[in-house]
Amino acid sequence: MSTLFIIIAVICRIFTNSFSNVFQKQLTNFGENSLKINFINYLILSIFSIPIFFFCNLPLYNKEFWLYAIFGGIFGALCNCFMVMALKRGQLSVLAPINSYKSVVSLIFGIIILGEYPDFKGITGMLLIFFGTFFIFENIKDIFAQDIRYRFYALFFSAIEAVFIKKVIIISSVPVSFAVSAIFGTIFSFIILNSTKTFDFKIPNKILINKYLFLALNFGLMTFTTAFVFKNMNVSYALALFQLSILLNLFFGWKIFSEKNLLKKLAGSLIILIGSTMIILTHHI
């Protein structure tokens, strides 16, 4: 696979991830229900992914494929659900750096499950992430706020989802992985929405329709390019590059949502990025 295509995919993934977060937060600011946003996003994606089933080979009789696809859909729906809920309550520039804690979580699970203890670089990276957090939050008590907890839930479910997505890609292909992710994401996000009895059938106005379409476009591109990069690039390096979206989210939080303390958050984000990259590139998560 051409290196140029991989670089383009990485850049596209970084930008579409940030744009997705912006549109998700804008929709919540318009008063849209977080769970409804999650469902409609997946619904639009599933509609546009239907042609993939006619042009790609679907491993219909592979039980492992369907098992991984179903669990990927469950954890994907949960991840995006908590992400939107976090964005509704918190600042984009604060929530974005939390994604770097994924490397800390992986490090901890590596110790518990695999008996892999971090070296000096790994410990230093973890300490840098914790240190950078002091710059991001106005108060250390903010770490226990509801929006931060929701962001950690999203991070946790995202890490699990990634495992199942990788399995689906190995068994089938990137396009098929994208399509089944959209279909099962729609099913399980509707189940989550319906269980809360908050679903309404009001037709959104033109502005909201455009926001939903742009969200689905960016989220879809993010999902597809993530799968493409994972298939063609060392996952550890890809994760390190994806962290650059933190800086983009920081800029959007300041420019679009008028969030304060840009320089302080930038300093914290850079420290967190360095720490996260040290862990990821050292331990090949």
Image (cartoon, helix red, strand yellow):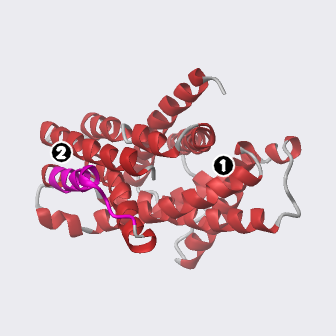
Image x and y of residue 190, in percent = 62, 67
What secondary structure predominates along the stretch shown in magenta? helix
Image x and y of residue 205, in percent = 54, 46
83 on left or right of 36: left
Tell me what residue is drawn at x 24 percent, y 47 percent. 272
**Mark seen at residue 268:** 2
Mark 1 or 2, closer to the camera: 2
**Mark seen at residue 62:** none
Residue type at mark 2 is: Gly
Q: Does residue 37 appear in this view?
A: yes
Q: Is residue 144 magenta?
A: no
Tell me what residue is drawn at x 36 percent, y 61 percent. 107
**Number of residues whose C-alpha sits closer than 10 Å to that of mark 1, classed few (under 14), some (14–19) or many (20 or more):** some
Residue type at mark 1 is: Ile
Image x and y of residue 195, in percent = 57, 78
Q: Is residue 122 magenta?
A: yes
Relative to 116, is 169 above or below? above
Image x and y of residue 261, in percent = 13, 42
Q: Earlier in the sequence, mark 1 or mark 2?
A: 1
Span of residues in magenta: 116-132
Q: Does residue 87 appear in this view?
A: no
Residue wearing tag 1: 44
